[in-house]
């Protein structure tokens, strides 16, 4: 008894999904976190709350609304169809969109904290040395916030690997496209294939533990979101 | 210890029965596809007998796992006949209590009016993007759907378009939200009082798939619960049968 080819396909797909999602989240999350750390706008509270929503909402709520919004009758679905992209549910791209939304707080919040911890002084110092805003961002902020980026990447990746409800609601369980490890485990349990479920579930447990161990043992990083 | 405990339970149970034959409560695990008719049957059962019914809904495989791991269910209404039979073999039921309470009917359904013709030709035309079905490994209606596709010789043609719900409720939800133009769902989900409630549908001829026998059984925990026995008797009776038929199941 060991992993079947469909189990391996699910693992590969999950890694692809989590990698792509993490890269996109760093690209999207960095400007959001930077803005949240620097702004005095009244919108700060609203944006912060929206970003944090996926942490408190059950994945079924997110999955259900994404399914309806991205479906052919929903606003997003109409837009993607008008753009010739088709509709997103039941596609890998749809899962990526769902995962980006679902894991957003796990990337934005560590970055936000890291940016806030830097404070004004290094930036003022950079400005007196005539560094422009872009220059000081890349040569001062990014190196100083490096631990925050590492934490954000690990949490974003791990949280996407562990995603279940959104994928279940949005994916349609298509092998090689939307059937991730967590859904595959659910299927095994439902089909009473406990031995196969154990292989995958045990692997998932080990993976999660190793990731968190790496995160919490690292001296240079502060664990968690705080 | 065990004996004295069971003796105590028996005495307690008997005295409870003696004091309040009318007020017993029964915990029922119900397959997702039967949720709506069950609520109606439960309301009538409670009114007619004075017993109380507490229902938990879920996929058949999931409910099985819960029963095996000590869930407090006393009656099990499955979406198939193999799972109750398996529980019976494994000694988790009251022997002789198992019977078929409903026969499920499969329907090809679309949320769009006029999309499905009454012969299912829409399947052969193959102009749709997605066809949703229940997971054939775990959902009896999903298995029936694959049997229909095999019989029609369309299995390979539509395979890339199949999307699976974990159970028939989710398969319906994919079709109802329009994300899948077509879905093989339970007739009970789109049928009330003799007609289709919305969209368009082809009721699949019974010859195209194995009968979906849905069996009910009293679980070991319900052995000495009068309400459990009463509920199964009620389910066999004419009032429940009328509700079951009104929702498009066979008997």
Image (tube, coloured by chain):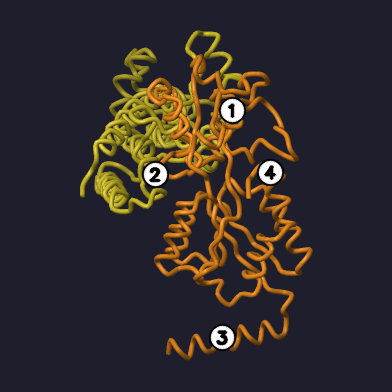
Chain colours: A yellow, B orange
Mark 4 — residue?
A: B247
**Nearer the observer, B237 or A163:** B237
- Of pointers 1 and 2, the one earlier in the residue sequence: 1
Q: Residue furthest front?
A: B207
Q: Secondary structure at mark 3?
A: helix
Same chain for marks 4 and 1?
no
Alpha carbon of mark 2 to alpha carbon of mark 4: how far? 28 Å
Alpha carbon of mark 4 to alpha carbon of mark 3: how far? 39 Å
| Image mark 4: chain | B
Mark 1 — residue?
A: A68
Q: Nearer the viewer, mark 2 or mark 4?
A: 4
Is A201 placed above or below A103 here?
below
Q: Nearer the viewer, mark 1 or mark 3?
A: 3
Mark 3 — residue?
A: B10
Same chain for marks 2 and 3?
no
Question: Quick check: B143 left or right of B102?
Answer: left
Rendered location of residue A116, percent (x, y)? 42, 33
Mark 2 — residue?
A: A187
In the picture, the quarter occupied by the C terminus of chain A is: top left
Q: Residue at x 73, y 80 (%)?
A: B20
Q: Is residue B238 visible?
A: yes
Rendered location of residue B223, percent (x, y)? 55, 74
Q: Secondary structure at mark 1?
A: helix
Which image quarter: residue B224? bottom right
| Image mark 2: chain | A
Alpha carbon of mark 1 to alpha carbon of mark 2: how far? 24 Å
For label 1, the crowd category at 10 Å Cα-Cα, with few meaning under 14, some 14 to 19 and many 20 or more, is many
Alpha carbon of mark 2 to alpha carbon of mark 3: how far? 39 Å
């Amino acid at each position: 008894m060991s992993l079947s080819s469909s189990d391996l396909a699910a693992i590969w797909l999950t890694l692809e999904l989590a990698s792509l999602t993490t890269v996109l989240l760093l690209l999207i999350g960095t400007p959001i976190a930077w803005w949240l750390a620097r702004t005095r706008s009244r919108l700060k509270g609203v944006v912060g709350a929206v970003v944090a929503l996926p942490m408190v909402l059950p994945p079924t709520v997110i999955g259900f609304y994404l399914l309806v919004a991205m479906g052919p009758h929903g606003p997003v679905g109409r837009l993607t169809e008008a753009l010739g992209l088709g509709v997103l549910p039941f596609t890998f791209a749809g899962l990526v969109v769902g995962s980006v939304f679902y894991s957003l707080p796990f990337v934005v919040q560590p970055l936000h904290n890291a940016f806030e911890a830097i404070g004004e002084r290094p930036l003022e110092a950079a400005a007196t040395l005539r560094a422009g805003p872009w220059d000081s961002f890349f040569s001062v902020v990014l190196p100083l916030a490096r631990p925050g980026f590492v934490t954000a990447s690990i949490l974003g990746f791990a949280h996407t690997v562990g995603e279940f409800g959104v994928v279940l609601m949005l994916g349609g369980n298509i092998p090689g496209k939307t059937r991730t490890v967590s859904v595959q485990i659910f299927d095994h349990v439902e089909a009473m294939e406990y031995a196969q479920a154990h292989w995958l579930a045990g692997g998932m447990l080990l993976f999660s533990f190793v990731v968190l161990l790496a995160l919490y043992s690292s001296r240079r990083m502060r664990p968690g979101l705080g | 210890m065990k004996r004295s405990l069971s003796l105590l339970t028996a005495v307690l149970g008997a005295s409870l029965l003696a004091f309040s034959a009318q007020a017993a409560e029964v915990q029922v695990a119900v397959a997702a596809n039967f949720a709506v008719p069950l609520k109606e049957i439960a309301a009538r059962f409670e009114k007619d007998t004075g017993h109380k019914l507490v229902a938990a809904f879920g996929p058949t495989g999931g409910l099985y796992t819960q029963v095996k791991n000590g869930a407090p269910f006393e009656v099990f209404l499955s979406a198939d006949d193999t799972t109750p039979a398996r529980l019976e073999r494994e000694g988790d039921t009251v022997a002789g209590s198992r019977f078929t309470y409903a026969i499920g009917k499969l329907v090809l359904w679309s949320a769009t009016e006029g999309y499905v013709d009454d012969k299912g030709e829409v399947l052969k035309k193959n102009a749709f993007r997605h066809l949703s079905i229940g997971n054939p490994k775990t959902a009896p209606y999903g298995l029936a759907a694959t049997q229909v596709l095999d019989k029609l010789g369309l299995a390979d043609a539509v395979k890339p378009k199949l999307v699976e719900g974990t159970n028939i409720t989710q398969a319906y939800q994919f079709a109802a939200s329009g994300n899948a133009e077509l879905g093989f769902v339970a007739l009970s989900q789109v049928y009330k009082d003799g007609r289709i409630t919305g969209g368009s549908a082809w009721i699949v001829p019974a010859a195209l798939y194995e009968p979906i026998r849905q069996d009910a059984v009293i679980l070991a925990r319900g052995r000495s619960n009068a309400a459990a026995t009463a509920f199964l008797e009620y389910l066999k009776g004419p009032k429940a049968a009328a509700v079951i038929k009104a929702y498009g199941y066979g008997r």
